[in-house]
Amino acid sequence: MKFELHPQLVADTFVIGDLPLCRVLLMNDARFPWVILVPRRKDISEIYDLSMQDQQLLWQESALVAEKLMKLTGADKMNIAALGNVVPQLHVHHVARFKTDAVWPKPIWGQGTAEPYTDANKQQMLRNLSDMFRGFLVRV
């Protein structure tokens, strides 16, 4: 059986591409620059379920996403979390936060209503993120 994204992730995100381990997704919530990494391994729900090599690669890819997203957005803080309470498939959120955002300093989960990207804003954000990861993505 091959890797498949959880249906909730399919419904809530746009695919940016693949890093060596993870599928890179943009969350469809324009309130926050929000990238999600999903290791392309089947039946994985926790970081410790990954091989040691994959755990190390996940953290390398997470650091890459965090650094690039901070540079792209100029955010005040990068929130990184692997929750899995709603979507059991292992996925790691990277959310660029600003002291001026509507819910600062609270966590974003359960705060307000998602604001989907407009088509134009979605295309621009996907272009920016694809450019940001140029040279790192193994598949777009």
Image (tube, rainbow, N blue to C red):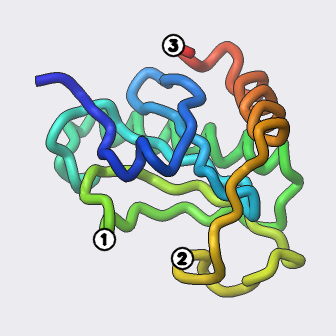
Residue beneath the point at 31% across and 59% down? 87
Q: Residues within 10 Å of mark 2 (few under 14, many from 20)?
A: few
Residue 14 appears in which quarter of the rendering? top right
Q: How far is mark 1 from mark 2, CA to CA?
A: 11 Å
- What percent of the width, then of the height, locates residue 96? 72, 59
Q: How far is mark 3 from mark 1, CA to CA?
A: 29 Å
Q: Earlier in the sequence, mark 2 or mark 3?
A: 2
Q: Is residue 87 left or right of residue 1?
A: right
Outermost residue on the left side: it is 1
Picture layout, residue 37 above or below residue 126: below
- What percent of the width, then of the height, locates residue 22? 42, 32
Q: Residues within 10 Å of mark 1 (few under 14, many from 20)?
A: few
Q: Earlier in the sequence, mark 1 or mark 2?
A: 1
Image quadrant in which the C terminus is located: top right
- Residue type at mark 3: give it: Arg
Outermost residue on the front side: it is 119
Q: Is residue 43 left or right of residue 57?
A: left
Q: Earlier in the sequence, mark 3 or mark 1?
A: 1
Q: Is residue 27 left or right of residue 41?
A: right
Residue beneath the point at 45% across and 53% down? 92
Residue beneath the point at 61% across and 19% down? 136
Q: Is residue 80 left or right of residue 90?
A: right
Which residue was labeled with disc 3?
139
Which residue was labeled with disc 1?
85
Which residue was labeled with disc 2?
109
Callout 3 secondary element: loop
- Residue type at mark 1: give it: Asn
Residue beneath the point at 75% across and 67% down? 97
- Residue type at mark 2: give it: Trp
- What percent of the width, then of the height, locates residue 7? 32, 46
Picture layout, residue 107 above or below residue 10: below
